[in-house]
Every structure is written in structure tokens, then in C-alpha cells.
Amino acid sequence: EGVYVHTSFEEVKGWSVVTKHGLVVLVKNDAYLIDTPITAKDTEKLVNWFVERGYKIKGSISTHFHGDSTAGIEWLNSQSIPTYASELTNELLKKDNKVQAKHSFNGVSYSLIKNKIEVFYPGPGHTQDN
């Protein structure tokens, strides 16, 4: 069991290359993504890396609607990997004509696995949904 940081990169016009980070939480032989990499291709590579090492991808939570958290949702959905986001995040994705997570939750906190993975919403920060 452990928590690992995944890093992807995006070239942002006027800023150069920007790093994006998310997490992979391992619980026995199961893996859970906290935010996807910046592209669907990077998401697929990340998932395959863990699968090749014997882990089953059990789900993904996107913590806000920006691409550095959600760009891999469509690919994950196509692979029947459960995707989760807050109702607000899914609303913002819908407003931007982006693919939404299959499962949504509301309230201040959500436990994907009791006593293992919990996300919470303390109020707007980096974005209105994070």
C-alpha cells in the first residue's frame, strides 16, 4: 500500500512547459487515480504501467474541472474504469462541453474507500470547484 505522485507536462503558450501532478493510491492490488494526467494518452500510459505490474485500476477521482485533473476521463470511461467527480465539477465539465465523470457526489467530503481515500471540498481555491 502506498501513495505515488504522477507527473505530466503541458506546454502552455507564453509560459513554457508546466508540470501537472496527481496521485495514485495503492490498496493491496488495487490502484486509484486522484486526478488524471494532462492527456488521454498519458492517462493510458499511466494505467498500463500499473496494470503491467499487477494492479487493477479500480477508479479515478477528479478534484476539479481543469484538464490536469480531467483530461483522461473519456479514456477511463471507455475502459469501464469508474470515474468520480463532485456534482459541481461535472456541471462545469458539462458547461465546457467536456466529458463528465460517470459518478458524482455532493457535500463537503466523499469517501471512495472508508479510512483510505477521502476527498473534501473546503471551498473555492485554484478553481471554483477546488
Image (spheres, helix red, strand yellow):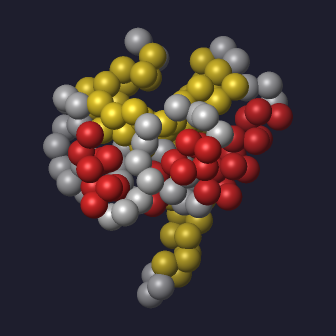
Residue at x-position 18% and y-position 50%: 124
Q: Is residue 21 left or right of residue 121?
A: right
Residue 126 can be seen, yes or no: no
Q: Is residue 52 left or right of residue 78?
A: right
Q: Is residue 117 left or right of residue 55?
A: left
Residue at x-position 81% and y-position 30%: 53
Q: Is 78 situated above or below 119?
A: below
Q: Is 15 situated above or below 19?
A: below
Residue 123 image point, x, y percent? 16, 43
Residue 54 image point, x, y percent? 80, 25
Q: Is residue 25 left or right of residue 108?
A: right
Report the residue that reaches farthest toward the bottom. Answer: 14
Residue 88 image point, x, y percent? 24, 45
Residue at x-position 34% and y-position 34%: 104
Residue at x-position 54% and y-position 51%: 74
* Front-lying residue, 7 or 92: 92
Residue 44 can be seen, yes or no: yes
* Front-lying residue, 80 or 27: 80
Residue 17 image point, x, y percent? 55, 75
Report the residue that reaches farthest toward the right. Answer: 52
The quarter of the picture where the N terminus appears is top right
Q: Is 10 situated above or below 83?
A: below
- How many discs appear? 0
Report the residue that reaches farthest toward the left. Answer: 123
